[in-house]
Image: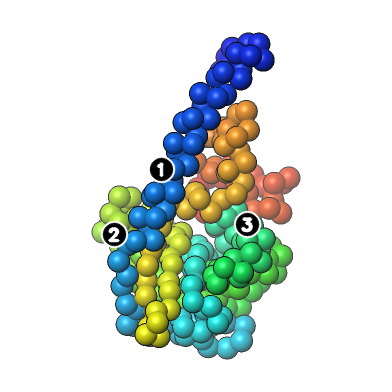
């Protein structure tokens, strides 16, 4: 793409014009975030028991003494040798954020359907410290629309992201938010999938202000460039999103 080369004064005029649009976008984003927080809540009536390094724990236990819980649905199914590269890209941002989220009454953790031993092996490889628990043997992933049977995938019988995307894998990513109400009950307040997860990726926010941006238009799919952080030097091109 060719760019005009201008004087400093001309650049400043263009930059101020863009600043006005950036401020408008910021106000619109704040308004959208307020609408997100104003969504109605759904009481979680089903009992889920997760396998954790500390033993079996309920959904209420996962809050860790805080009133708000953010669950990242990490694509790591039973028997998978390693986690999804794109989920791994997102998860690289969690440890730094968790230090600060704890100061705002928020617990952030990952949940996968893989057994705990498989989760812990991959977590050690990646060097992550954030809490990561197993929902193996529960309906948690299915209830929150991130795990599907192979038959459903083959038959294209299920949809993802509130019916906007056809399912193409037995495991897909998502983020779900929960709160403990004053009545002691747990409520589901929000879930996001697909491009709704962009806001979790700090690296994308940096790329969005770099001269070339995300630079993904020529790739076979978004995030085709992403590798697990220990694979950038030697990994072959990805043939599919979860290679």
Provide the secondary structure element on which disc 3 rests.
loop
Cα distance between the residues tagged 1 and 3: 25 Å
The residue carrying pointer 2 sits among few (fewer than 14), some (14 to 19) or many (20 or more) residues within 10 Å by Cα, namely: some
Question: Residue at the location (32% across, 77% down)?
Answer: 43
Residue under numbered circle 2: 158
Quarter residue 4 falls in: top right
Earlier along the polypeptide chain: callout 3 or callout 2?
3
Q: Horizontal placement of 5 versus 33: left or right? A: right
Q: Which residue is mark 3?
A: 93
Measured as percent of width and height from the top left, residue 51 is found at 53, 83
The location of residue 82, given as percent across then percent down, is 60, 63
User: Is residue 196 rendered to the left or right of residue 164?
Assistant: right
Mark 1 neighbour class, 10 Å CA radius: few under 14, some 14 to 19, many 20 or more: few
Q: Is residue 165 above or below residue 66?
A: above
> Mark 1 falls on what kind of element?
helix
164 relative to 232 in the view: left or right: left
Q: Name which of mark 2 and mark 1 comes first in the sequence.
A: 1
Q: Residue 28: which numbered mark, if any?
A: 1
């Amino acid at each position: 793409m060719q760019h005009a080369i201008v004087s400093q004064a001309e650049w400043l005029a263009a930059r101020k014009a863009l600043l006005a649009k950036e401020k408008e976008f910021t106000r619109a984003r704040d308004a959208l975030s307020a609408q997100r927080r104003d969504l109605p809540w759904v009481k979680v009536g089903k009992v889920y028991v997760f396998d954790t390094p500390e033993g079996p724990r309920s959904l209420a236990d996962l809050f860790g003494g805080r009133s708000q819980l953010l669950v990242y649905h990490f694509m790591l199914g039973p028997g998978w040798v390693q986690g999804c590269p794109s989920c791994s890209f997102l998860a690289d941002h969690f440890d730094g954020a968790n230090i600060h989220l704890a100061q705002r009454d928020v617990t952030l953790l990952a949940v996968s359907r893989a057994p705990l031993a498989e989760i812990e092996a991959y977590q050690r490889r990646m060097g992550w410290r954030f809490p990561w628990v197993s929902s193996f043997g529960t309906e948690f992933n299915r209830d929150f629309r991130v795990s599907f049977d192979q038959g459903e995938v083959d038959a294209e019988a299920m949809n993802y992201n509130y019916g906007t995307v056809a399912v193409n894998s037995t495991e897909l990513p998502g983020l779900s938010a929960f709160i403990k109400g004053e009545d002691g009950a747990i409520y589901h307040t929000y879930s996001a999938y697909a491009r709704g997860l962009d806001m979790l990726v700090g690296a994308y926010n940096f790329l969005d202000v770099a001269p070339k941006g995300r630079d993904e238009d020529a790739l076979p799919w978004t995030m085709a460039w992403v590798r697990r952080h220990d694979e950038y030097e030697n990994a072959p091109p990805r043939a599919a999103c979860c290679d």
